[in-house]
Image: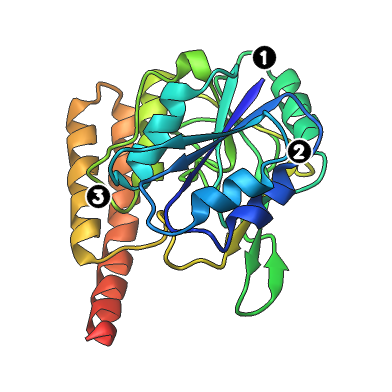
Amino acid sequence: MISVIVPFYNAEDYIEQCINSLDQPGDFEFLFVDDFSTDNGTDVFRRCAPDERFKLISNERTKGVSGARNTGIDHASGDWVTFLDVDDAYLPNAYQTFSSTIASDKRANIHQLNHRRYYAKLNKTSLKYTNTSGTYSSARMPQAWFGVWNKLFRRDFLTVRFCEGLRYGEDGLFVLECLALDDYIHHATRNAMVVEHRFVNQNSLSKSKCEDDIFDYWHELESFIRRQTSPQLKRTVCGFMSEQWATEHLLTIICDQNKK
């Protein structure tokens, strides 16, 4: 069974559409984690959930996307775990694609699949990141390695959790923590595509950031580097920080100034 964890907060406008995309045959459980919403999202879920595979879990306080995902992991009972943003969608035949990916490399604890992106403002779908099939590691990371919604994680392997203090970059840090346990990612074929990653809800749990959020992220990456014993993993994270620092920092300052 595959456990799909969907965190949400004040997302009543997106829940029905998400559920409709997930309502397809397969040995799934869909764990919708309400992060202490104040809107009618839970009512929408109860009205739209078609069968017992769809389960609602409620946090007793707002924990952010990391805390909501951790709640989902703690309740997951599938052999495999993956994540989905509530404003994203699954493409048809998702379970068959997941199953064929798992069968193609039984050694892997982490599988990555290609995805497509939908930009609401442009009403455009594109393949921004694609990878060839094969195996990857910290020495050769696949494109879009920093996402968790494009991956399957073996549940018994998931002894790490998302950093609940982060509001930005929590996906990438989680993937790195997993690679510290097993530096091996199997990437499925180009045609193995399950997720449509949508840029629609700019207020979602995983799409907000400010300058302080980025500083917190860099601090956690530095702490991660100091804990590692693998020189290769350290080099990879240092290289990533060097490439991203100026761009992320400057763009966020500009965004913060535009909000004033």
Left of 130 or right of it: where is 227?
left
Tag 1 residue: 106
| Total marks placed | 3
Element type where label 2 sits in the image: helix
Applied colour scheme: rainbow
Q: Which mark is residue 217?
A: 3
In this rendered view, identify the residue nearer to me: 63 or 45: 45
Labels 3 and 2 touching (C-beta < 8 A): no
- Residue 161, image x and y in percent? 34, 29
Question: In this rendering, is residue 28 above or below 164?
Answer: above
In this rendered view, identify the residue nearer to me: 114 or 55: 55
| Amino acid identity at mark 3 | Tyr
Q: Quadrant of the C terminus?
A: bottom left
Element type where label 1 sits in the image: loop
Callout 2: 10 Å neighbours few (<14), some, many (20+)?
Answer: some
Labels 1 and 3 touching (C-beta < 8 A): no
| Amino acid identity at mark 2 | Ala
- The numbered mark, 1 or 3, whose residue comes first in the sequence reads 1
| Amino acid identity at mark 1 | Lys
